[in-house]
Amino acid sequence: MMTSYQPALRPLNTFAGSSVAIDRLNNNRRDMTKLISESTAPSTVFLLLDTKLKVLGSPDGNRPLMIDATMPLHHTLATVVQDEAKHRDWMLVGRVTEDQPELEKLKAGTLLFVVRLDSDFPQAQVPEHVQLDVRAFALATPDNWLHSVVAHARSVFEFYNRHSFCGQCARPTRVLKGGHELACMDQNECTTSWFPRSDPVVIMLVVDPVQDACLLGRQARWPPGLHSCLAGFMEHGEAAEEAVAREVVEESSVVTTQARYHSSQPWPFPYSLMLGFVAKATRTTIQVDPDELEAARWFTRQDIQHMLTTEHNGCSLPPKGTIAHALCQAFANNDPVTQYE
């Protein structure tokens, strides 16, 4: 008798989670006048990125530097938000919905902005800090939802960087709605707008129920021994399930069916959305495309269980906090999503 698959509620992956704690104020962003005026309010807090989009972190590196109204820098950052010429240097995150005991500066009602400090910013005003790579910070602190906020901001600023000019008429663009819309400066003839987007990527763990094994591959540029799930960008005109089957057969010659959704992960490098799937292999012979992969092979469930904690037979997995790790964890735990007849 075939067992029906019942998807379970899964914990959110790293770089997700801010919408649980933050009201993004979508309906209020249409008129930013009031929200901008609140930038000087005692309840407003600023997070900071540098010109390379690294996070300015607390000296211990455990959290982003949070600038509140007790600090002299607060006023300077509010003037950035209120300066029409600085519209590309900040974004509105939203309002904190409830007190955050582990982050004492974030109370219910706190309005949260992120400011990107340009090269002319008076660095003497910035408190002692360390520069944190967004990826390294997030993977080191997977339980801290603030990594979702800085990932959100990083993706939005990356989008600004790539869309300085209108794609229709080549005039400069302007940031609107607190960072959540770009519009052509020519609002008389062109009127074109863009919204910060996420590029969808499928990432899949292919399971062979006969061998009780999963398919992992590696690229030549990766650290020695590192293997991961196969992945690739979706193309126009295809569903995510189609992209799963296409990418697997293109990269490895393995044929799949029954793609099942597992979970997703924002990936702010620059602004992708990883869609995690599990799929069943129906043809298991591997022949890699050398332009895509250096190698691919089947790993048993026992192999994966070992690799989740340490290197095994010279092979390792992506770190905890990545969706590839979560997919491998699901296989190791015999999660129902990985079970096929």
Image (tube, grey):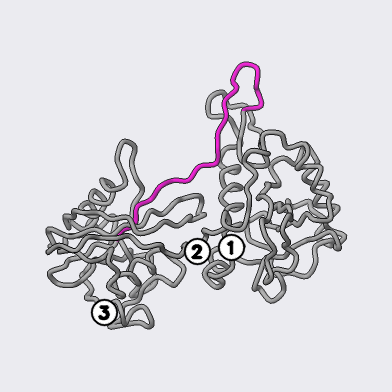
**Residue 294 seen by the camera:** no
Give the SS element for disc 3. Answer: helix
Decide which of 112, 248 is in the foreground and name it.
Answer: 112
Residue 199 sits inside the magenta stretch: yes
**Of the residues shown, which amino acid type is indicated by label 1?**
His
146 horizontally vs 315: left or right: right
Which residues lie in the magenta part?
A: 184-204
Disc 2 is placed on an element classified as loop
Instruction: Residue at 61% x, 47% y: name it.
Output: 157
Distance of label 1 from label 3 (alpha carbons): 31 Å
Query: Which labelled disc corresponds to residue 147?
Result: 1
The quadrant of the picture occupied by the C terminus is bottom left
Say which of marks 3 and 2 sits in front: 2
**Residue in view at x 12 percent, y 69 percent:** 210
Q: Position of residue 59 (x, y in %)?
A: 72, 74
Q: Are marks 2 and 1 in contact (CB under 8 Å)?
A: yes
Q: Residue furthest top?
A: 189
Residue 117 on image: x %, y %: 73, 53
The residue that disc 2 covers is: 14
User: Spatial distance from mark 2 to mark 1, Cα to Cα?
Assistant: 8 Å
Which of the image's four quarters has the N terminus? bottom left
Mark 3–mark 2 contact, CB under 8 Å? no
Residue that carries the numbered disc 3 in the rendered image: 303
Q: Name which residue type carries label 3.
A: Asp
